[in-house]
């Protein structure tokens, strides 16, 4: 896996492992996320949509809710999120409300779409008819410094930092 | 309150009542949502972010999760959502994943911003730097038939229909 400044490779590996385990155990789709604070994992979440009858139970939402319970607060300032895949619009919204310091993601939305988890219809609505992800190359100029992708071992890892509230 | 084709005014009134009660009882912000199926309310949700230490506990998310538990399924096809305020990006994402037939909302995001609940920073990120809501007037042409607003009693009500999956 490629090096990305600030990213702890071990946490991303852990997220990917959990995402695979989630499918093997029949719990849900291949998605997992961790919340890290002061170098320690304080929560993990995996996609539990179908098994928990909860369309909001995406990995990031599950991990965020659990981390907040753990900390007894409703925001995650000072925390980092590692997620195996680029967040969908719902999760991106949840991340903005939770206000972690940084978010690192593994696979991209295009990788997810290729295996049948396609969120472009939501972006199409958000963009008034045009399907465009916030991190699509077309936005690369505007996004410079906000999103950086690195490819390694056939995976891309990216950092979603410079969050709007910072 | 103005008439909107298909909208049951009583359900929107109920959502607004619950939103007010939510503030009075100290549970959270002035937001509430209902899920309706075959003319019956199957769940209600209010904003519980601060009291439940859950940044994802917006009214729509709470109502969707509860309705799915009620129906023991992870999608809300055949259901309608009535929400006291235009959904934020997180809730809009949750709504798309839940796939209700229709969504009616009362106040707009601009109304919410005026009382301190501003989600424009999230839209700014989703639009690559520009703050623009999917239902902003600038999109009116493209959105024709998808979002229609009616003003009445100093409230606007709008229908978010023609959901992308229909």
Image (spheres, coloured by chain):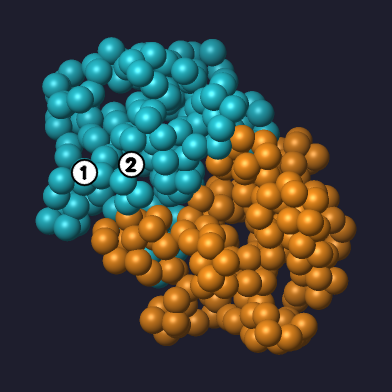
Chain colours: A cyan, B orange
Q: Quadrant of the N terminus of chain A?
A: top left
Q: Which residue is mark 1?
A: A147
> Seen in the image, is B144 located left or right of residue B21?
left
The numbered disc on residue A129 is: none
SS type, badge 2: helix
* Residue A136 x, y percent position in the rendering: 23, 51
* Residue B30 x, y percent position in the rendering: 68, 59
For disc 2, the chain is: A
> Seen in the image, is A58 located left or right of residue B79?
left
Quadrant in the picture for residue A16: top left
* Residue B154 x, y percent position in the rendering: 68, 84
* Residue B148 x, y percent position in the rendering: 58, 80
Task: Examine the rendered structure and indicate whether residue B102 appears above or below residue A112.
Answer: below
Q: Nearer the viewer, residue B143 or B26?
A: B26
Of pointers 2 and 1, the one earlier in the residue sequence: 2
Q: Which residue is mark 2?
A: A109
Task: Examine the rendered structure and indicate whether residue B156 appears above or below residue B129.
Answer: below
Task: Examine the rendered structure and indicate whether residue A75 appears above or below residue A166.
Answer: above
> Seen in the image, is B43 located left or right of residue B161?
right
Name the residue: 75% across, 37% down: B69
Name the residue: 24% across, 17% down: A9
CA separation in Å, label 2 and label 1: 14 Å
Let me know if residue A85 appears in the view. no
């Amino acid at each position: 896996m490629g090096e990305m400044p600030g990213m702890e490779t071990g946490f991303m590996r852990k997220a990917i492992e959990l995402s695979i385990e989630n499918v093997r155990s029949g719990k849900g789709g291949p998605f997992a996320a961790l919340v890290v604070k002061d170098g320690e994992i304080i929560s993990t979440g995996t996609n539990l949509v179908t098994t928990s009858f909860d369309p909001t139970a995406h990995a990031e939402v599950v991990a965020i809710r659990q981390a907040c319970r753990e900390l007894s607060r409703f925001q995650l300032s000072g925390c980092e999120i590692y997620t195996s895949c680029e967040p969908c619009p719902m999760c991106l919204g949840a991340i903005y409300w939770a206000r972690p310091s940084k978010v690192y993601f593994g696979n991209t939305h295009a990788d997810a779409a290729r295996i049948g988890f396609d969120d472009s219809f939501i972006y199409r609505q958000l963009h008034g008819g045009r399907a465009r992800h916030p991190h699509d190359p077309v936005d690369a100029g505007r996004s410079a410094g906000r999103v950086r992708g690195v490819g390694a071992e056939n995976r891309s890892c990216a950092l979603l930092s410079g969050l709007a509230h910072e």
